[in-house]
Image (tube, coloured by chain):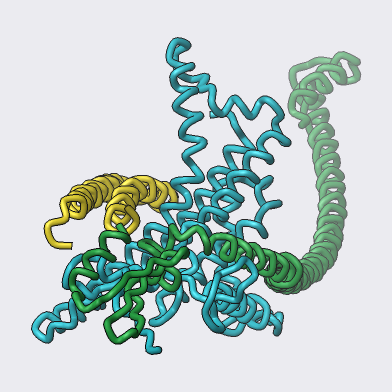
Amino acid sequence: MEGDIANMGQFIGAGLAAIGSGAAAIGVGHVAGNFLSGALRNPSAAAAQTATLFIGIAFAEALGIFSFLVALLLMFAV
Amino acid sequence: MAKDIVLAQVEGQPDLDALIVTEDGAAIGVTEGGEAVVLVDDHAEAPGMPQLNFETFPNQIFWLVVTLAAIYYLLSRVALPRIGAVLAERQGTITNDIAAAEDLRQKADEAEKAYDKALADARAESQRIAAEGRAEVQRDLDKAIAKADADIAARTAESEKEIAAIRDEAAASVEQVAREAAEEIVRVLGGNPEDADLESAVSERMRGVRV
Amino acid sequence: MAVDTAVDHGAEAAGPGSNIHPMDQFIVTPLFGEGEVAWYTLTNVTLWMAITVLCIFALLVLGTRGRAIVPTRTQSVAELAYGFVYKMVEDVTGREGLKYFPYIMTLFMFIVFANFLGLLPMAFTTTSHIAVTAVLALAVFITVTVIGFVKNGSAFLGLFWVSSAPLALRPVLAIIELISYFVRPVSHSIRLAGNLMAGHAVIKVFAGFAISAVIAPLSILAITAVYGLEVLVAFIQAYVFTILTCVYLKDALHPHH
């Protein structure tokens, strides 16, 4: 294993792909934060929009999961 | 990648005599003593991510379909109709209870109305009785007043008649006296008292006196 | 002749000197004996799916057998689950979507129980496998597409033709809509499997760190925190999968934007 260039590339690639998870975290934070600021402005309308909130979070999070998956594939499957 | 590992491992174990790589991916090293050591066994160990081991896909899909079918059967045949029925029944019970409460409230309202009506009737009755009594008293009173009025009127009429008779009598007396006085005056003055003019003049004068 | 396994493939792949195997918990193994995993083999997948079915049976069938007007504790949980999914279907798809309520309830109950059972120590998480979630998502995708075409005929294609956009933009939007429509089952399935796989792998990685006595307390704290998050994720992912199913169903029933 020592000095294996191909493996090094894999691990570096996996690490880079994991950055995407952090980016997804920013996205999820944006969704939740904006929902909260909207909900505090108009609390009566907030309850009806929780489903939309979760759908938005799910979409944002899915992309982070994709990058996580790429990292996993590089680590274990290539 | 598997080959690399095999080679690396063989380098790490210099006492191997020979390396056999079998068809299904297992690598077996043979040591000097003739003992076999399994170096890599792809056969027992899934490579990398177990999620991407396509050999297990038919198994998982088959059991998933069986599971979903079982759950769907359980839910659609037993659980969901039952829970739906229970919820509907509870809703029905609540509705019935509300209806019963409404019914009772209505009955209470009716009872109150009947009480009010009885009270109003009694009040009307009492008023009627009072009015009747008052009317009777009034009638008696009226009768008494009328009777009294009639008495008074009769007596007044009688008195007036007497007064009239007295006045007529008085007037007649006055005329008599006036005529006699006039005759006397005429006689004293030397006139003829049997003159018809005297009679008419006295009557003429008396008309103004008579009331 | 003594034969013993000298090399663990997974350990080597995870890096030199490392003995953390975060992915080993997802390996499908036969329950009895060794050998090939054929499509009919009884495996740990079979076991945990059977436990899932039993739990659903216990909650929704045994729990409600009293049919009580004033519910017992189990029955009120079952009614809560029923009401939760029923309201979700009704709110998102409208009344005509209620015909598909048993199907959506099946999906929800399976996913939520598989997720929670997977959180038990030593358990196998069936929903962390792409094969399982892909079948679930493809079933939804195919069902919804078929319903869309059966209910609306060719008017279902209006889903891709955004009539509120300027005319020049519409063909471009149509291509984007078409692509996003076909990406739906991919993201639908990978979201669920990926979330669970990620959470379980992270727990395993922290557990591996606990080998060192110095780091162990920190590692246990981290596992506790991640476990709490995973309990949340287990429910939210089931909810998200179900509500997205409802949204896709709504698109099929009312394809006009």
**Which quadrant holds the N terminus of chain A?**
bottom left
Percent coordinates x, y for residue C37 in the rendering: 56, 70
Write down the quadrant of residue B19 in the picture: bottom left
- The chain in yellow: A
Write down the quadrant of residue B122 in the picture: bottom right
Q: Is residue B200 above or below residue B121?
A: above
* Left or right placement of residue C142 versus residue C162 in this view: right
Q: Is residue B199 above or below residue B21?
A: above
* Left or right placement of residue A76 versus residue C183 in this view: left
Percent coordinates x, y for residue B11 in the rendering: 19, 69
Seen at 70% across and 72% down, the residue is B79
- The chain in green: B
Write down the quadrant of residue B169 in the picture: top right
Q: Nearer the viewer, residue B163 or C213?
A: C213
Seen at 55% across and 62% down, the residue is C108
Q: Is residue C167 above or below residue A34?
A: above
- The chain in cyan: C
Q: Nearer the viewer, residue C51 or C251?
A: C51
Q: Nearer the viewer, residue C148 or C178?
A: C178
Percent coordinates x, y for residue C47 in the rendering: 56, 78
Seen at 51% across and 35% down, the residue is C181
